[in-house]
Structure formats: structure tokens, C-alpha cells
Image: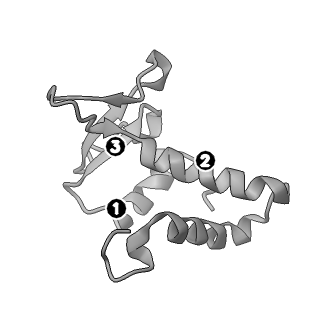
Amino acid sequence: MLPNVRQVTIKPIITDVISVGAKVFTDEYDIYARLPAWGYRHETVCHSRGEYARDEDGDGFHEVHVNTIEGFWSLLRSWLRPHRGISQEKLPIYLGLTAWTMLPTSRSNGSSR
């Protein structure tokens, strides 16, 4: 678990997990402001303005969104709700289980369902 949500805390996690030069989609939370300075391409959606997805090139496909991760957290929360909380030390196990449930490539030969 993170001791806090400051840029100095998340930078090593981001640089360990995400390749420099990758495009990262987030909301406009301040901790993500330095992503471009750290070498990432960064796109945001502004939930406070009612923006949840954006079609940048007018082709009808909303390229900029954070719906996938928000769906992940929603599924995890609804699965954990009956347990009325869990220990932080066990959270990585529940995160892994939720990821395994949502991501077909994590439990197959790489083909989609």
C-alpha cells in the first residue's frame, strides 16, 4: 500500500511499471501533472466538467477515457462490499483476483473470449 498519494511516492511505481514514452490516461488529479516531465505522453479527462470520454479526432471512437480502470475499481468494490472491509496486507491478493477475473489474457493463451 502507498503511505500517501504524492508525486514523490507514485513516481517510482509509475517508472517501474509503465514504459517511458507510453501514453497514460488519467483524470486531472494533481499527482499526475508531472507525467510529461517524466517522459510520458499524458491525456486527461475532466470529471468536474462532466467529461468522462473524449473523441479527439471526430471518428466516433472516444480515445481518451479512464473507464477501464474505473470499471475495475467498481467491480472490486462491489465484490468486497459484503466483507465490510479487508486488511491492507491482503489487498494485493484481491487486486490480483479482480484483474484475473477482468482480463481474459491473464488466464488464457492470449486470445480474447
Measured in 3D between alpha carbons, the distance from the residue under mark 1 to the one under mark 2, in whole angstroms, is 26 Å
Disc nearer the start of the sequence (1/2): 1
- Residue 61 vs 106, above or below: the answer is above
Mark 2 surroundings within 10 Å by alpha-carbon count, few (fewer than 14), some (14 through 19), many (20 or more): few
Q: Which residue is mark 2?
A: 74
Q: Residue 53, located in which quarter of the rendered image?
A: top left
Q: Which amino acid, by three-letter code, is at mark 2?
A: Ser
Disc nearer the start of the sequence (1/3): 1
Measured in 3D between alpha carbons, the distance from the residue under mark 1 to the one under mark 3, in whole angstroms, is 15 Å
Look at 45% across and 33% down and name the residue there.
30
Judged left or right of residue 17, residue 95 is right
Q: Which amino acid, by three-letter code, is at mark 3?
A: Phe
Q: Which residue is mark 3?
A: 25
Q: Position of residue 50 (x, y in %)?
A: 46, 19
Look at 50% across and 54% down and name the residue there.
9
Query: Which quarter of the image is occupied by the N terminus?
Result: bottom right
Residue sitting nearer the eye, 90 or 104? 104
Mark 1 surroundings within 10 Å by alpha-carbon count, few (fewer than 14), some (14 through 19), many (20 or more): some
Residue sitting nearer the eye, 20 or 83? 83
Look at 53% across and 53% down and name the residue there.
72
Q: Which residue is mark 1?
A: 15
